[in-house]
Each structure stands twice: as structure tokens, then as C-alpha cells.
Image (cartoon, helix red, strand yellow):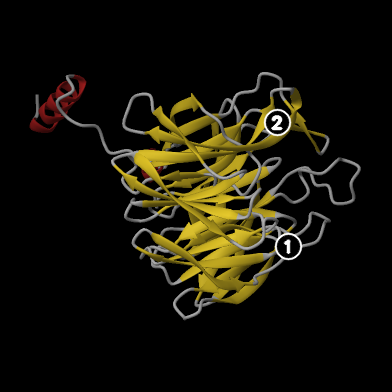
Amino acid sequence: MNHLFARRALAAALLSAGLVAPAAAELALSANDGKVRLENGVVKTIPGGQDTLAVIDLAPTRKGQAPKLLHEINLPASIVGPPQSVAIAPDESFALVTANMRLDASDPPKQVPDNRMALVDLTTNPPSVLSSVETGLGPAGVTISAKGNLALVANREEGTVSVYAISSKTLAPLGKIDLGNPKSGPSGVAISPDGKMALVTRDGDSRIAVLAIEQDKVEYIKKDLYAGQRPYGIHFASNGEFAVVANIGIGQGDADTISLIDTKVVPPRVVETVTAGQTPEGIALSPDNKYVAVCVMNGSNKPINSPYYNALGVVKLFKVVGQKLVYTAEVQSGVWTQGAAFSADSKTLLVQNKEQKELQVLRIVGDRLIDTKQRVSLRSGPAAIRTAK
């Protein structure tokens, strides 16, 4: 037996005995809505449908392999709102999942606003729900600070943002930020990497609110940005120098937009807006800050006889060049495409296809976007996605 073979045999024996830790996972979380489906462009409820949270390991993609579905557990989730209703702690130890809507117990086909958020322990096997946390009405986007000590939740149905202190996988409510308009529809929320600022998209009045953060004190400074019609998904660059936002428009077949926000300057401001396509709901920045991925519904959620209908959605890739967003590539996605998330090395992109109940795996090669044909099948339709990066 040669030395290399002997070392491999010993490592395999130790691993099987539990004495050597396996390679570290790189987690992506997909919150999935099992309550609803599309029927010729109309949202229909599914009797007995179950919402879930899927835990996916992205580590295999470093070797060109497909991501691995580790677990899919039951918990409340919702497709209503931007596909950022799940957040994962920087150390991947826990997650938060909001539930924007629930079925009305007295009238099951009807959905009504919920006010719950699940706190999930990701260190157990399988992951377990530690607690159900009360939020404001209609919680949508949720974010966790880079230090892992603060969480913000956008409450769409009451025009507020809930603030929580985090310690040892427990959440302590610190109150709510009133945005001054109960119909403002706060949807997406993102905290800057330095933890000093948050941006909140306002679907109801087409603004982006700027919040100032000092330790656990969060304040709406009455400063708003105006990127486009109905800003929705939002994402900070990992270096904190800019953010990108998807402006989804009003769903009338128009070409909608995405914008780049300069967050280095005081006050922050919108410096670039470009056309992305019909309803760019999902938006994600690569961890290396070079690329912006945009999930464009492209009319795939419309009735077949609609003049705006297309059979499939589109994922578009834009390159960040200074303060410009430059279109580079696109590929077809599925029906009712939702969010997207990059791997830590910025080379793999997961895309949520709601009606196919799958995650589509794309690769970034140069400035090209390649469909690997790899898919991760889920029990329920994916509605929101996040990684720790």
C-alpha cells in the first residue's frame, strides 16, 4: 500500500468514525410557499399546502457539482413581498423567516396578513424552529446586521419597521420605526456592512427610506431616495460603497428598472438607473461586487391571453463598472421566477422558479451566464432566498 493510499484510507476511516470533521458547508436558505400556485395568471390557494424552509449546501459548486439539498422543514412562509423574507446569521448558526400572509381559518381560500417570524436553529440536525416571534402586520423583508446583533423587519401592512436585538439565538424586541405613512408598504430592508445605515424600500409610495443606526438605536432620519416606480428588492455591496434596488413597476407590461445607490456620500443618492425588463422582482449582488443578477418575471405570471404574457422568465446579469450598470448576459428561467443568491466565490447563482418548485443553477463565466441544467427540486414553490454573504 503506498503512502498516499494509506493516508486516504486512514482519513476515510476517521471520517466514518466521526473523528474528522467533514468539509465546511456553505449555506443558502430558500423559504418556500406551499399555499398558492398560479393558474393561468391567477393566484389560487392549495388545500393542505405546506410552507417550508430548504437548507442547501453550496460548497459542492466549488468543484462544479450541483448544490446539495440538506433539509426541507415545515414552517410559515409567504411569496407575498420581495424575495428577501429570509435572513441567515453571518456565522450560519440561525435564520429568520417571516410569514407575510396566512390562510384565513374561517375562509380558507382567502389569505390575510400574518404577523409571525420563525427563529430557526441551523446547528441542529435537522434544523429546528426555536421560537415564533411576533412582528408587525404583514412582515416581508428581513435582514441581520454583519455583527449578528441586530435584525430589522419591514412590516408591509402597517408602514413600520420592527427592530430586534439578537443575543445567543434569542430576539428581544426594541420597538418599531414609524415611516410616517401606514400605506407606504415597507418591503425590502438592508443594513450596511458597517452597521450604521439601513435602507427600506417603500412599495406603496415609491420611496426608499434611510435609517440611521447607532448600536441598537435605529432612527428614521426623514431622508428618502427616489429610484423608480415601486422599489422592492434591495441589496448592499459587501464593501458598503453602494446598494442596488429593483423597481418592479405596476405590472402593465412596461420595461421596469434597477438602480444603483451611492452610499459613500452623505446623504446617499441614486446615481444610475437602467432598464431591466418586465417586473424585475429578485435582485442580488455578487460577494465580489462585480455583478448584479436580476430575476425578471417577464410576464410569465400573466394569463396566456394577456398581451404581456411570456411563457418563461429571464435572469439578467449586469456588470458594475464604476457607478454604471452594464448589461452583459441573460438566460431563460422558469415561471413566476422569484429571488436569486450568489455563492461565496461569486461563480454560482441560484435562481428560484416558483411554479417548477425548483432552484435553477447558473454559472458566471467571464461576463457570460451559463445554465448548468442542474436543478434542486423542492416540495413547495420557492419564494425567498438568502446566503450569509
SS of the residue under disc 1: strand
Per the model, the C-alpha gap separating discs 1 and 2 is 25 Å
Quadrant containing the N terminus in the rendered view: top left
* Rendered location of residue 352, percent (x, y): 59, 41
Asked if disc 1 and disc 2 are in contact, CB closer than 8 Å, the reply is no
Categorize mark 1 by other alpha carbons within 10 Å: few (<14), some (14-19), many (20+).
Answer: many
Q: Amino acid at mark 1?
A: Asp
Q: Which mark is residue 379?
A: none
Label 1, on which residue? 256
Q: Residue at x 56, y 72 (%)?
A: 222
Dot 1 or dot 2, earlier in sequence: 2
Name the side, left or right, on which 64 lies relative to 136: left
The vertical placement of 312 against 253, above or below, is above
Q: Amino acid at mark 2?
A: Val
- Whether residue 294 is visible: yes
- Whether residue 348 is visible: no
Name the side, left or right, on which 265 lies relative to 208: left
* Rendered location of residue 18, percent (x, y): 18, 23
The vertical placement of 23 against 106, above or below, is below
Which residue in the rendered view is the most extreme toward the bottom?
266
Label 2, on which residue? 36
The image quadrant that residue 44 belongs to is top right
In this view, the residue in front, 311 or 200, is: 200
Name the side, left or right, on which 5 lies relative to 252: left
Categorize mark 2 by other alpha carbons within 10 Å: few (<14), some (14-19), many (20+).
Answer: many
The vertical placement of 297 against 105, above or below, is below
In this view, the residue in front, 153 or 64, is: 153
* Rendered location of residue 203, percent (x, y): 68, 57
In this view, the residue in front, 9 or 96, is: 96
Q: Residue at x 41, y 34 (%)?
A: 120
